[in-house]
Image (cartoon, rainbow, N blue to C red):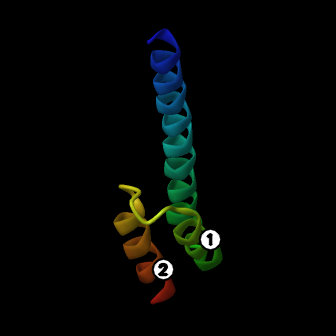
Amino acid sequence: MEKLNSLVSHLESVQAELDDEIIEEVINVIQSREQGLALELVGALPENHPFLPFVVALARKINSK
């Protein structure tokens, strides 16, 4: 059970790090309005990631400018 708890804790930590990186990159996109980075972010997210709809919408908005 300890091993399982340790693995879950590690997974949560890794997911939090990934979320922080995604948030940082989204901020960079907003600041730079760089279309390529927005599209790269969309391609890097798994389909079930909670940020995907936001990043897709952001990429569309940047692409339309």
According to the image, label 2 marks what residue?
62
Q: Position of residue 60 (x, y in %)?
A: 43, 82
Q: What residue type is labelled 1?
A: Glu
| Residue 65 visible here | no
Quick one: SS at disc 1?
Answer: helix
According to the image, label 1 marks what residue?
40
Residue most extreme to the bottom = 64
Q: What residue type is labelled 2?
A: Ile
The quarter of the rendered structure image containing the N terminus is: top left
Residue most extreme to the top = 2
Quadrant of the image occupied by residue 49: bottom left
Question: Distance of mark 2 from mark 1, alpha carbons?
Answer: 13 Å
Q: How crowded is mark 1: few (under 14 residues within 10 Å), some or many (20 or more)?
A: few
Residue most extreme to the front = 1
Question: In percent of the image, x 51 and y 58: which residue is there?
Answer: 26
Q: Position of residue 13 (x, y in %)?
A: 52, 28
